[in-house]
Image (cartoon, rainbow, N blue to C red):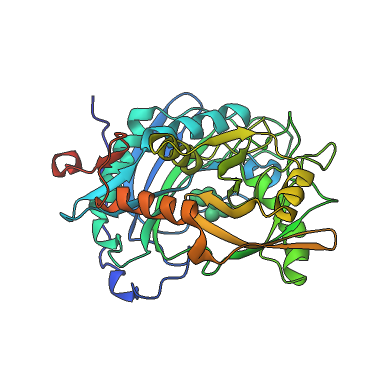
Amino acid sequence: MPHNIRFEPVSASRLSEVDFNNIPFGRKFSDHIFVVDFDGENWVDPRIVPYANFSISPANMALHYGQSIFEGMKASKNQDGVPCLMRPEMHVKRLNSSAKRMCMPELPESLFLEGLTKLIGIDSEWIPTVQGATLYIRPLMFATEEHVGVAVSKTYTFVIMTCPVGPYYTKPVRLLVEQHYVRAAIGGVGEAKTAGNYGASLYPAQMAKEKGYDQVMWMDAKEFKYIQEAGTMNLVFVIDGVVVTPLADGAILKGITLNSFLHILKAKNIPCEQRHITIDELVEAYKSGKLTEAFGAGTAAVVSHVSEITYNDFTMVLPPVSERKIGNMLYNEINGLRNGAVEDIYGWVVPVKKSALAIV
Ligand code: COI
C-alpha cells in the first residue's frame, strides 16, 4: 500500500546556482528532502519538503551519544533521460542493519523506497548528465529525544537529501599505513555506517594529510597486521592477476559498490578473493612485481586509484593509471550500468518510472 507522503514544493528552485561542469563533492544540495519521524512507536508524517535547517535541542541525544547512521547512494539518468537508482534495496537493508547495531528503529523498506523514488522524481533536474558527475543521495537517521543521560533515544528523524557531485577524489590517492590509531575492532561498530566511525578517523587522517597523504590505510586493531579499509572506501588489490579484497570480518564496512565489483568480476571470469591480507603480503607482492593495481571502491569513491602506499619508511609506487586494466574496467562497467551504456544483466538498475512519482 502506498504511504501517504505529503509534498510541499519550494517557492523558487536553486538549480540555476549550480555549475554542472564544476561541482565540488557535497556542497550544493537539491531543492527538496524526504523526512519522516519516529514517535516512539510509529514512523509518522512522511513528507517531501524544501531543503532547510532543522531546529534541534541542545539536549538532542544524537549530538551527545552518537546515535546517527547514514547511507551513500547515487542516481543517474540513462540514455533515454530516465532517472535510475542502483541496488536501492541493498542500501535500505544495510541502513537497517546499522540501525539494529545502534539500537535505532528499522525503517520499513517500502517507506524508504517510496520516499526515495518520489524525491528523485521531483528533483530529477538536479541529476547531472555531464561525464563523471552524478546525483549523490544521503539517507540519514538520527536520534531526536532531549535527554542528557546515556540511553537509547525514543524518537528519531529519517532524512534523504541529495546533491549533484563530481568525483570524490580528483586524482589518484596516496595512502599511509596507520600503525598507531585504529578505526574499528571486531565487536565494535566498524561494520555499521555510523557517524562515530568517521569521527574517529578524522584525527589520524588529518595527521596523514599533514604529511602529504590523502587517506590512511587502516589495519586490524589487535596486531596491526591485516589490512581493513581506507575509511572513505573499501580497498582492492590486484596481485599476480588475482583481485584481492579484505574479508569483511565485522570491523569493515560491507561495501555495496565492492559487492557489485565482485559480481562483475565473477561474471567476467576474473579471479577474485575476499580474504585476510597482511601488509607483509602486500609488500612482498610489490617487491616481486606482482602488485599491479590498488584502488578504493565505494559509492562516493567509485574506483579511486591508489598511486602510492607508504608503510614505515617504505613507499610502494603503483603503475600509472593508464595501465590499470581491472580498476579502469570496473569504473567503466559501473558507470555504464548507471547510464545505460552497459546492459544490466544483474537486475541492479531501478528506473524511476513516471507512474511512481504521483504524490498522494
Ligand atoms: C559513500 O561512499 O557513499 C560514503 O558514504 C563514504 C563517505 C565518506 C563519502
Question: Relative to residue 205, is residue 92 drawn left or right?
Answer: left
The percent position of residue 296, horizontal first and vertical second, equals: 57, 52
Q: Picture coordinates of residue 57 (x, y %)?
A: 60, 49
Residue in the picture at 47% in, 55% down: 325
Q: Is residue 59 visible?
A: no
**Residue at image location 33% in from the left, 72% down from the top:** 20
Q: Is residue 68 above or below residue 312?
A: above
- The outermost residue toward the front is 288
The x and y percentages for residue 286 are 71, 54
Q: Nearer the viewer, residue 132 or 277?
A: 277
Q: Is residue 64 above or below residue 271?
A: below
Residue drawn 34% across and 38% down? 46
Marker count (numbered)? 0
| Residue 248 location, quadrant | top right
Q: Quadrant of the N terminus?
A: top left
Of 64 and 113, nearer the camera is 113
Q: Horizontally, is 328 left or right of 196 in the view?
A: left
